[in-house]
């Protein structure tokens, strides 16, 4: 009788140990999936406007890019750097 109780006790310990290991592994894989979904990607933005204003020293040249529907980006540079025909923006 004592051997049967001991065997059942060992079986319960093994079952809960395996269950907890699998539970935590599943939880970690769910977190990894969320991290994968949060990865950023590059979007190509095309130049649609350029404004040169010599009165503002730090942003003499303002380049405006269209990255998609209702998504515009402004890049300020000095007069020395020309606006590129397109840029890649991280989204």
Image (cartoon, grey):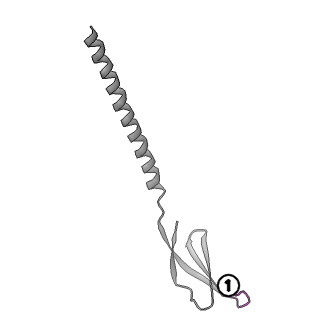
Q: Quadrant of the N terminus?
A: top left
Q: Residue at x 48, y 63 (%)?
A: 40
Q: Is residue 64 left or right of residue 35?
A: right
Above or below — where is 80 with respect to 17? below
Closest to the observer, 19 or 55: 19
Q: Is residue 5 magenta?
A: no
Residue 67, percent across and down? 55, 72
Q: Residue furthest top?
A: 1
Residue 55, percent across and down? 74, 89
Disc 1 crowd, CA 10 A, few/some/many (<14, 14-19, 20+): few
Examine the image and state in which quarter residue 7 appears. Answer: top left
- From the image, tell me which residue sits under label 1: 58
Residue 76, percent across and down? 63, 81
Magenta residues, dominant SS class: loop
Above or below — where is 12 with respect to 42? above
Q: Is residue 50 left or right of residue 27?
A: right
Q: Residue at x 60, y 72 (%)?
A: 72
Identify the secondary structure beneath mark 1: loop
Tell how many labels. 1
Closest to the observer, 90 or 31: 31
Above or below — where is 3 with respect to 22? above
Q: Is residue 56 magenta?
A: yes
- Magenta region: 52-59
Q: Residue at x 67, y 84 (%)?
A: 59
Q: Residue at x 46, y 60 (%)?
A: 39
């Amino acid at each position: 009788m004592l051997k049967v109780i001991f065997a059942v006790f060992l079986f319960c310990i093994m079952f809960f140990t395996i269950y907890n290991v699998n539970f935590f592994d599943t939880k970690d894989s769910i977190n990894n999936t969320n991290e994968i979904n949060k990865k950023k990607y590059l979007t190509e933005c095309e130049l649609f406007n350029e404004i040169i204003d010599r009165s503002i020293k730090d942003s003499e040249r303002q380049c405006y890019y269209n990255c998609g529907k209702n998504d515009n980006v402004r890049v300020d540079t000095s007069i020395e750097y020309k606006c590129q025909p397109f840029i890649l923006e991280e989204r």
